[in-house]
Amino acid sequence: MSRRALLLYFGGLAVLVLASALFAFRPTPLTGFDGGDLAESLNSSFSSSTSPCKHRGEGWSCQVWDNSTSGTVTYEVDNPDWWGCWSATRQPAQGYSSTPRALSGCITLLDHT
């Protein structure tokens, strides 16, 4: 094989691997997202499962299970950006909550339901 052919082969392979990795870690530009995908992404911080997030005007409202209250707490989540990355703020809960006040993350391929 000539040097040029090897360069084209390995260059094409590198582009394919990079595109595959980009899709796996940030699929949102191609696939979009819904409330279930956002809930899965948010809940990955808690190892729990709750209902899909609900769209509320400029953002989303998501509930996650809180073991310290034996109930759910609500997070207001900003609309994810083009890459599927989001930031969330816990809303005031009744009593003490062990969940973090603020969270951030990105929707990955594993979050798509």
Image (cartoon, rainbow, N blue to C red):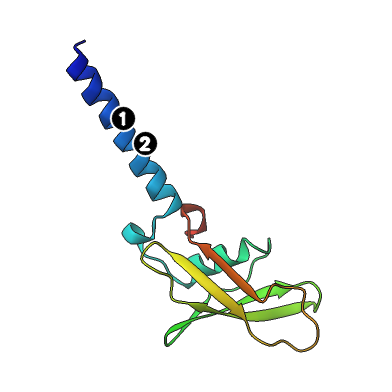
Q: Quadrant of residue 20?
A: top left
Foreground of the two, 53 or 92:
92
- Classify mark 2: residues with Cα within 10 Å, few (<14), some (14-19) or many (20+): few
Question: Are circles 2 and 1 on residues that touch, CB within 8 Å?
Answer: yes
Residue drawn 41% across and 43% down?
A: 21
Amino acid type indicated by mark 1: Leu
Secondary structure category for the residue under label 2: helix
Residue drawn 48% across and 56% down?
A: 108
Residue drawn 43% across and 76% down?
A: 79
Residue drawn 79% across and 72% down?
A: 67
Specify whether 63 is left or right of 32: right
Residue 61 location (% of width, % of height): 54, 81
Instruction: Identify residue for label 1.
Output: 13
The quarter of the rendered structure image containing the N terminus is top left
Instruction: Identify residue for label 2.
Output: 17
Distance of mark 2 from mark 1, alpha carbons? 6 Å
Amino acid type indicated by mark 2: Val
Residue 45 location (% of width, % of height): 64, 62
Q: Quadrant of residue 29?
A: bottom left
Residue 113 location (% of width, % of height): 49, 60
- Label drawn at residue 96: none
Q: Quadrant of residue 71?
A: bottom right
- Please count the marks in the image: 2
Specify whether 59 is left or right of 12: right
Secondary structure category for the residue under label 1: helix
